């Protein structure tokens, strides 16, 4: 692709989410839904069927009153790089239709709806429950169809969908930059959730670019990734001061030290918040 | 051969190796995808010119500024206005999903009159001319104007002034707004610092270094929600409440006081500051009055030890809070449980004022501050005795006709079965709601207003900002339904009233709006926002550093209001839990916001209550059980969610659910906390200050 002609180095877009700042307000979920024409259902409380590309979970430290603490975990698609970070994401590896693909120039895991035939292997393969299936054609009641954005195609029955890191926003920014013969600026391409977060908990950018905030943040002492030991190599990093939160990032046994796998945290935090 | 799953897989495996080289599988998968994507129809969103228009949100009192994203003549997304001093580019989920309210199934098509029984949902469409004439005729036919009451979404502002003018013309003084924390705060300010009409109370949280929150949901919607969420993430906080809310979990210290006793806790902290001489001596001795009597009263009644019997908070913890509060540079104490939608007792408000004053945190950076009155040219006169007048609304036979502009009393004021019945017995109900809310559903006549995305209108912000603020909604698009600006309707109906011609002589609402906003108009029309001076920084006050004398007032009424009912029939205590994901005001959540509600709060249309495992065990309940939650004011079916973060003996229910109207996305889902919460009248103000209710929970 020669759209990158003035910038040859491959990009690796990623996110750093500060869990100590997240208030669980849900603005990211709503902004994402509006940005990406997410279908709605009458009963959104059935979380097996409700579609939320980014979902904010709540976890607790399991301690009894009054030592209980809670933490919110926003979970977009982790845009896994796979073992050795070479594009063998769990979902990409299993898709028989090449409907989900790893873009080596951006690190983004795509989902091509018109190719997807709904076998849902990818859903089974994704360890993060980041994928959702359209069991029905979306119904936009009343005049709701008027609010659909032309930047993102609405999905149909029988296909899987997931967070795209608002790839259409990258396309728009990249086209503009290409015309002006320059590279895309950090702030020109930001995801809808990042932009919407009132607490500034989400930071987005090119993990490979030392000038981008995420480059430094991902190396923070508080940084960790989800299910690190599966070698999925997620591009979403989380930050927390609290040790119990960092521990919740993987299925560690109570007597087990966290692994020294790439990106795994060192056990130095004192906990508390 | 019967092909079972294993055979099928084996066949598949064998086939793969051979066929990869052939184009067949690709053709097959392509066919399969075409076949699986049999669309009934295909929405292809139309494209067009991309642009943003400004605006303001009216879905809560927060007053956020909007950037409305449009494609051609369609609104596709709502975002926050980046340079707004109120919300600096961000919005809550409710505000973000407003495009779905605009186009959604709960919109009312146009003016209509009731046909069939009240609440039956049978309507006759009217023209606007007919609808206005019907309203004017009805109002002219009333024997006594005193039977007319009107509820307005704002206490000041251009439309509120028209509503009051209409009532004046009819001879009624029942101009009402939904009660809020600010009603209590303003009365407390009048007693301690003096107050001119229209002046409000603000908290300069931007410049504070410690927030002592007495039950306020700083991170979940108190005050101007977006501004406060940011504060919650950035400031040190001490949170006092019986439930581990997000605010409590984010706080540096969580003080689980017994429900409803936050005011007593504030006084115990004040007493500890006096006892330990931690208060600001210079401020207290130079700028205040009444300290000797007040401190003696404190030490007699509210020492940490004495207060412990009420609050359950050990004296050591009270002292810790006192030391932290006194030790901070510019701390501020704020109150109003949850989102501040319910007033607190005057005594509790006075306690919080006193606590701030002991630290000198009044009328200075980072403190509790006086906010100037809005300089409207056509202003609203403040109603006397608002508390009693509101109470009259839920008494049978006291109201002949009710006008509702954006408050939805059948949801927000229906605090018991009795209250709901009283509201339903009102002779004539007129709703101006753009949405089929609970009140519109019970109305006799609906004259639907535009939504905040379809009209221009001032939005006076009364949400604890440190300076007076008005924002402006703007018409991002032409009205989607056959709606009409309520301001326009009031001018037209007002002129049709006997003796109303002179009082409503404006040509149209727009020219009236400009006149009404007076000196604020220029800034409003240009920037979508007007802000007054920071009152406490003006003139001499600024030079002296402190501007005002403060009087310590010993409150007369009770600080903590008791809950009705007996402990034997209702052994538990019900409290609300708050979330930015659930709108608890007049307008309900849109479909996108419903997505964000967790399945420990609502499933299959049933609300969950959260309780401590030990509470559940005692009641013979387990996780996921269905149970009946009863208070002296009503009962509901709920499901049980166990949560260690709830004080034992307390049951928490998410506020804002249990709507019966709107649309199939929110209507009929869950239980209304309000409907179970009942009344706790503060004798000093007449306001219902309910903070919860006695409750029982039984399996089944
Ligand atoms: S999170 Fe799931 S869907 Fe996203 S790249 Fe990883 S495996 Fe694929
Ligand atoms: S918008 Fe930000 S603070 Fe709110 S839930 Fe999402 S990440 Fe958390
Ligand atoms: S906080 Fe209130 S004013 Fe702001 S966007 Fe949300 S509902 Fe609207």
Image (cartoon, coloured by chain):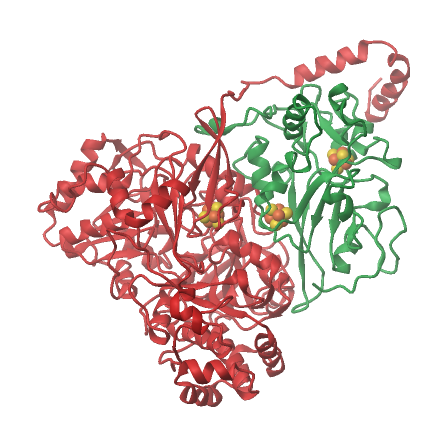
Chain colours: A green, B red
Instruction: Give left or right: position of B406 versus A177.
Output: left
**Camera-nearest residue between B442 and B452:** B452
Residue B289 screen position, x and y as percent: 39, 83
Q: Is residue A162 above or below residue B574?
A: above
Q: Is residue B545 above or below residue A175?
A: below
Residue B34 can be seen, yes or no:
yes
Q: Quadrant of the N terminus of chain B?
A: top right
Q: Quadrant of the C terminus of chain B?
A: bottom right
Instruction: Give left or right: position of B362 versus B643.
Output: left
**Camera-nearest residue between A41 and A73:** A73
Q: Going 47% across and 41% down the picture, which residue do you hit?
A: B66
Instruction: Give left or right: position of B515 versus B333.
Output: left
Residue A136 screen position, x and y as percent: 59, 27
Residue A234 screen position, x and y as percent: 79, 40
**Camera-nearest residue between B295 and B637:** B295
Instruction: Give left or right: position of B173 versus B462.
Output: left
Residue B583 screen position, x and y as percent: 47, 49
Q: Dividing the picture into quarters, in which one does residue B645 lie?
A: bottom right
Q: Is residue B356 above or below residue A197?
A: below
Give the mark count: 0
Residue B446 can be seen, yes or no:
no
Ligand 1 lies in quarter: top right
């Amino acid at each position: 692709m020669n759209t990158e002609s003035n910038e040859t180095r491959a990009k690796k877009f990623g996110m750093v989410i500060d869990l100590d700042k997240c208030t669980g307000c849900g603005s990211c979920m709503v902004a994402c839904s509006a940005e990406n024409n997410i279908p709605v259902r009458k009963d959104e409380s059935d979380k097996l069927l409700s579609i939320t590309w980014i979902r904010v979970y709540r976890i607790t430290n399991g301690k009894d009153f009054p030592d209980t603490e809670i933490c919110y975990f926003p979970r977009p698609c982790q845009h896994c790089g796979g073992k050795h970070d070479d594009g063998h994401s769990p979902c990409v590896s299993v898709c028989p239709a090449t409907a989900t693909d790893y873009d080596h120039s951006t690190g983004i895991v795509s989902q091509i709806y018109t190719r997807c035939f709904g076998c849902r292997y990818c859903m089974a393969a994704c360890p993060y429950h980041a994928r959702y299936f359209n069991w029905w054609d979306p119904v936009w009641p009343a005049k709701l169809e008027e609010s659909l954005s032309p930047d993102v195609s609405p999905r149909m029955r029988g296909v899987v969908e997931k967070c795209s890191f608002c790839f259409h926003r990258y396309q728009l920014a990249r086209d503009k930059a290409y015309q002006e013969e320059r590279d895309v600026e950090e702030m020109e391409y930001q995801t809808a959730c990042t932009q919407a977060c009132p607490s500034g908990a989400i930071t987005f950018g090119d993990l490979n670019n030392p000038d981008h905030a995420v480059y430094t943040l991902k190396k923070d002492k508080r940084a960790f990734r989800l299910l690190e030991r599966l070698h999925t190599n997620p591009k979403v990093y989380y930050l927390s001061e609290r040790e119990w939160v960092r521990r919740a990032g993987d299925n560690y046994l109570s007597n087990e030290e966290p692994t020294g796998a790439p990106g795994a945290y060192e056990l130095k935090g004192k906990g508390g918040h | 051969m019967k092909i079972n799953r294993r055979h099928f897989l084996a066949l598949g495996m064998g086939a793969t190796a051979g066929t990869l080289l052939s184009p067949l599988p690709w053709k097959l998968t392509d066919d399969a995808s075409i076949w699986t994507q049999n669309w009934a129809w295909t929405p292809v969103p139309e494209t067009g010119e991309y642009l943003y228009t400004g605006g303001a949100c009216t879905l809560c009192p927060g007053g956020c500024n909007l950037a409305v994203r449009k494609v051609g003549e369609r609104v596709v997304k709502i975002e926050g206005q980046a340079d707004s001093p109120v919300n600096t580019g961000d919005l809550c989920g409710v505000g973000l999903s407003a495009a779905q309210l605009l186009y959604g199934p709960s919109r009312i098509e146009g003016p209509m009159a009731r046909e069939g029984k009240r609440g039956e949902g049978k309507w006759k469409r009217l023209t606007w001319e007919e609808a206005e004439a019907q309203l004017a005729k009805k109002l002219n036919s009333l024997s006594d104007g005193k039977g007319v009451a009107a509820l307005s979404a704002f206490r000041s502002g251009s439309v509120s002034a028209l509503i009051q003018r209409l009532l004046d013309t009819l001879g009624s003084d029942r101009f009402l707004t939904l009660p809020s924390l600010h009603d209590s705060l303003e009365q407390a300010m009048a007693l301690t610092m003096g107050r001119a009409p229209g002046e409000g109370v603000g908290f300069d949280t931007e410049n504070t270094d410690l927030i002592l929150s007495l039950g306020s949901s700083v991170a979940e919607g108190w005050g101007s929600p977006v501004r406060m969420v940011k504060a919650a993430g950035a400031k040190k906080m001490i949170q006092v409440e019986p439930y581990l809310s997000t605010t409590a979990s984010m706080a540096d210290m969580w003080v689980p006081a017994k429900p409803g006793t936050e005011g007593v806790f504030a006084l115990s902290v004040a007493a500890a500051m006096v006892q330990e001489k931690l208060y600001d001596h210079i401020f207290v001795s130079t700028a205040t009055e009444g300290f000797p009597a007040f401190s003696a009263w404190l030490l007699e009644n509210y020492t940490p030890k004495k207060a412990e019997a009420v609050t359950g908070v050990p004296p050591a913890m009270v002292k810790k809070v006192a030391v932290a509060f006194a030790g901070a540079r510019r701390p501020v104490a704020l109150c109003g449980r949850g989102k501040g939608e319910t007033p607190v007792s005057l005594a509790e408000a006075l306690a919080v004022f006193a606590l701030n004053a002991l630290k000198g945190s009044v009328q200075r950076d980072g403190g509790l501050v006086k906010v100037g009155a809005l300089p409207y040219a056509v202003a609203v006169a403040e109603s006397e005795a608002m508390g009693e007048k509101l109470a009259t609304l839920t008494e049978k036979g006291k109201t002949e006709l009710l006008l509702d502009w954006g408050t939805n009393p059948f949801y927000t004021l229906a605090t018991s079965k009795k209250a709901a019945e009283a509201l339903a017995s009102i002779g004539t109900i007129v709703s101006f709601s753009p949405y089929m809310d609970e009140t519109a559903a019970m109305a006799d006549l609906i004259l639907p207003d535009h939504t905040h995305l379809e009209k221009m209108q001032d939005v006076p912000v009364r949400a604890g900002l440190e300076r007076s603020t008005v924002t402006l909604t703007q018409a991002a698009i032409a009205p989607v339904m056959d709606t009409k600006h309520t301001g326009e309707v009031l001018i037209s109906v007002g002129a049709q009233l006997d003796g109303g011609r002179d009082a409503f002589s404006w040509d149209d609402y727009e020219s009236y709006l400009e006149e009404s906003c007076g000196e604020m108009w220029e800034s409003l029309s240009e920037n979508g926002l007007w802000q007054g001076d920071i009152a406490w920084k003006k003139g001499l006050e600024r030079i002296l550093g402190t501007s005002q004398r403060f009087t310590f007032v010993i409150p007369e009424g009770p600080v903590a209001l008791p809950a009705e009912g007996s402990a034997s029939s209702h052994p538990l205590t019900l409290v609300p839990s708050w979330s930015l994901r659930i709108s608890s005001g007049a307008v309900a959540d849109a479909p996108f916001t419903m997505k964000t509600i967790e399945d420990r709060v609502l499933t299959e249309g049933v609300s969950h209550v959260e309780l401590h495992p030990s509470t559940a065990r005692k009641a013979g309940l387990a996780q996921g059980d269905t149970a009946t939650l009863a208070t002296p004011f009503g009962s509901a079916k709920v499901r049980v969610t166990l949560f260690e973060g709830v004080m034992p003996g307390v049951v928490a229910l998410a506020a804002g659910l249990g709507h019966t109207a709107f649309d199939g996305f929110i209507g009929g889902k869950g239980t209304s906390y309000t409907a179970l919460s009942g009344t706790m009248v503060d004798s000093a103000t007449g306001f219902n200050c309910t903070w919860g209710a006695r409750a029982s929970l039984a399996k089944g």
